Amino acid sequence: MSLTFEEASAKAQRFLKELEAPFVGRHDEAMVITLSLMCGEHSVLVGEPGTAKSAMVRRAASLLNARFFKYLLTKYTEPSELFGPLDIRALRKGVYARVTAGKLPEAEIAFLDEIFNASSAILNTLLSLMMERVIYDGYVELRTPLWSLFGASNRVPEEPELEALYDRFLLRTHVKPLDQDYWAELLEASWRIEVGSISEPKPILSMEDLKAINRTVLKVNLDNVKSSLLRLLLVLEEKGLHVTDRRKGKILKVVAAHALLNGRSAATEDDLVVLKYTVPRVLEDFEKIQVILMEELRTKERVLRELNEIRTNVRTAGIKIKQLGPFDPRLVDHYKNLKVAKNKVLSLIKDFDDDEEITKIANEVINEIDELLDVITAKLNV
Ligand SMILES: Nc1ncnc2c1ncn2[C@@H]1O[C@H](COP(=O)(O)OP(=O)(O)OP(=O)(O)O)[C@@H](O)[C@H]1O
Ligand SMILES: [Mg+2]
């Protein structure tokens, strides 16, 4: 199966929308899950109990027509619970094998809840499974169909032996409890789930779809973002946010998936926001990176915010200007400031000339500035 950009994008968008539908304020989490699936990568949700981590992954699995395996790990979980029990009959004939039916080795999509409870025997097998999609077990090398593994945990692991496992989750998100503003909505949503008015969703994507979407991701044009990404990685490194080499190389894939998800066949700086899912390691990194990206990326959101700030300043200046008498020397300062503001607006919108919303606001602000410039000219009688 091969998909056009539009088809692939529409399928991924629909999945994202369906996934987040019953939840309140869980857009980033839905995004992380969707991007992982588009990339064939693993992701982990870290957050305090009861923040819908498990519920989100379970819903994602229901929306997929795929072989799914899920398990809640404790410190005492034995490898056989995940990888299948030893095949006694085979063993009698001297063959070492496991009965893998319905277990992790046969899963396309997996969910390991409380993943950082993994014991060292499980850990080693998981490392190769996640990287190479291979399970080394005794003398046997088992190829697996694993596409994405999702993990959930209440904490970021600090033990060095878990570092390698954590590093294999290309996407990570910190699932924070909802802000007060969302509580009323949360009550409604939980109630809908409780009374069963949210029915078990039907699958809307198959593994075939995911693979076709993934092939489309790999066709996204990245020429316009590579240098910005390099610059950002340097800034992040300077600010103490180190990205392992494995992850550096893979970030572009997530950037491409984000572009496709947003209907673009060529990535733009907007797509570098995925760094907020791929760079953070410890919890405070998640906050830090938001601030850095806000400063460093010329995203639409940021341009809109700056345009609105300029508009507010222009209006405040407008009130003062109208109060000033003719030939007041302060008019000259206002004139200069307004000229600077106008140039700022023009430079802000340079890369956004095909964005209707930005163009509209920018034109309004420029008109307001021009009117004030006329008022000043008249008062100065020049
Ligand atoms: N943001 C939300 N929107 C809607 N429902 C929510 C939200 N957060 C929590 N819930 C409700 O709370 C339930 C509990 O969530 P879930 O068991 O998935 O949490 P968890 O993060 O996996 O917790 P734990 O760490 O204890 O495993 C969900 O099934 C859902 O009904
Ligand atoms: Mg859970």
Image (cartoon, helix red, strand yellow):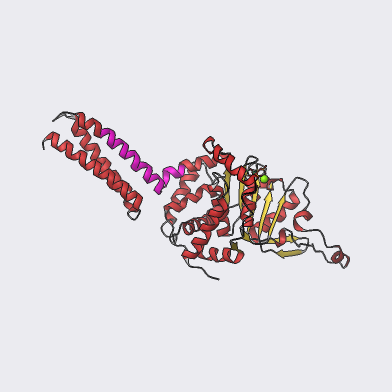
Location of residue 44 in the rendering, given as x and y in whole percent from the top left corner: 61, 49
Location of residue 71 in the rendering, given as x and y in whole percent from the top left corner: 72, 51
Asked whether the viewer can see residue 244, the reply is no
Locate residue 344 relative to residue 242 in the image: left or right: left
- Position above or below: 332 against 212: above
Location of residue 20 in the rendering, given as x and y in whole percent from the top left corner: 56, 50
Residue extending farthest to the right is 92
Figure quarter occupied by ligand 2 = top right
Location of residue 222 in the rendering, given as x and y in whole percent from the top left corner: 45, 60
Does the segment drawn in magenta span residue 129?
no
Asked where in the image residue 293 lies, by quadrant, the reply is top left
Asked where in the image residue 87 lies, by quadrant, the reply is bottom right
- Position above or below: 299 against 98: above
* Magenta stretch prevailing secondary structure: helix
- Position above or below: 368 against 13: above
Q: Which residues are magenta?
A: 292-317
